[in-house]
Image (cartoon, rainbow, N blue to C red):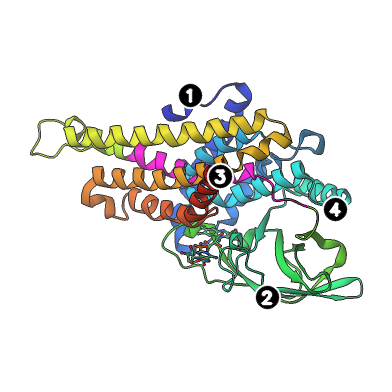
Amino acid sequence: MELFNSYIKNERQKRLFQMAERLANKAQERVKSAEEMAELPAETVADFRKENFFSITLPKALGGEGLSLYELVLIQERLAAGDGATALSVGWHLGIVKELAEEQLWEPAIFDKFAKEIVEKQAVVNRIASERATGSPTRGGVPETTATRQGDHYLLSGRKIFSTMASVLDYYIVSAYVKDKEAVGSFLIKSDSPGISIDKTWDTLGMRGTGSDDVVFDQVKVDATRLVELNNQANPRKAKGWMLHVPACYLGIAIAARNEAIHFAKSFKPNSLKTSIAKVPHIQQKIGEMDLKLMQARSFMYQTAMEWDNRTPEARQELSSELAAVKTVATNIANEVVDLAMRVAGGRGLSKANRFEQLYRDVRAGLHNPPMDDMVIQILAKRALAE
Ligand SMILES: Cc1cc2nc3c(=O)[nH]c(=O)nc-3n(C[C@H](O)[C@H](O)[C@H](O)COP(=O)(O)OP(=O)(O)OC[C@H]3O[C@@H](n4cnc5c(N)ncnc54)[C@H](O)[C@@H]3O)c2cc1C
């Protein structure tokens, strides 16, 4: 695809991009059934496993590809141009694994064993942290899921909402209030552990194919060594470069809408005109505006990813405001671009026979992935006022 080429800089990126393209095409074929079932199809996960996709963000020393942030953004954008729900889903896995490997958040013995399972079995993981009472965990609410110590294990009970890929995950990283530590912690739990059930609540406007159902934990017995993170540890909040998978996903959806709009404009010749609508000034205006917006958001995102890759871990911390700003800029621009594409298509953009309406529904979800816009603006204001 023309729009992507300028961001592919070498043979390795070309190879990774081509893999994303193959997987995007397969995922796109299943969008209709994924929308109907409101879950990520197991066949799509199997396709990704065949390409050893789930280990690409692990370091080479552990059997991965050592994906850079720039490369992560590149492939996420391409996947999302095929299907946004698939891209967002697998993006959580890739990003979490990248962070765990780079930040060494867990005991090495636990992480190395987990990494081995990712390489050998292509195990899939996600953090499930949202709850009805807390809403977004980024607001700092304490989980109502609790972990009670009993000898060498914990008993974990509670309910998580928005659990992306719930039914196809091998592992959940579950946040809970750990009573004996008087702190919030996270547990690594196998998804088939006794006491875990999935409540199929995911009946949403957009991103239906992420299957972000509720997961219920009823006295789930977890070995104490599986308490992998404690928030009261000397663990200052780190800048999260990997979270750029979110803006990349929504820009990919916007690119798909832009491409559909151009195709439509070139091919639609109403009998009131001698040409296609591509020659009409107000259509050209909208197409030009879409590209202007995409250029702004994408250059900001790729530039920030490149900065991240080129910096030392310490210097990366200074990028936390930029990372947050990229998310807000990209998701809002993606919504604007899809809106413009819908206007190019006119009323038939509303039809389920075309792709526009699904892209329009999916892109909307980006506003509700972290960090939320109001928090980003606050971060920028505080930084400016502290100068
Ligand atoms: C497609 C999709 C996939 C997701 N996948 C996952 C996942 O895999 N794992 C996971 O854990 N979560 C996931 N989430 C959940 C997401 O991270 C948020 O928890 C969820 O969207 C709710 O956040 P919210 O800001 O929209 O609403 P809420 O936090 O419920 O807040 C509702 C409203 O109140 C406001 N508000 C709430 N608290 C405050 C406050 N303290 N200060 C100011 N305003 C406040 C908000 O701005 C908002 O307007 C997913 C969400 C979506 C849409």
Determine which residue is flagged by label 1: 6
Residue 43 rendering spot, x and y as whole percentages: 58, 52
Determine which residue is flagged by label 4: 110
Q: Amino acid at mark 2?
A: Gly
Residue 16 shows in the view: no
Q: Amino acid at mark 3?
A: Arg
- Number of the front mark, 2 or 3: 3
The earlier-in-sequence mark between 4 and 2 is 4
Residue 335 rendering spot, x and y as whole percentages: 38, 48
Dot 2: what SS? strand
Whether residue 164 appears in magenta in the rendering, the answer is no
The CA distance from mark 3 to mark 1 is 33 Å
Determine which residue is flagged by label 3: 383
The CA distance from mark 2 to mark 3 is 37 Å
Q: Which residues are magenta?
A: 235-260
Residue 292 rendering spot, x and y as whole percentages: 35, 32
Q: Quadrant of the C terminus?
A: top right
Q: Amino acid at mark 4?
A: Ile
Is 305 above or below relative to 224?
above
Report the side of 179 relative to 291 (left or right).
right
Q: Quadrant of the N terminus?
A: top left
The earlier-in-sequence mark between 4 and 3 is 4
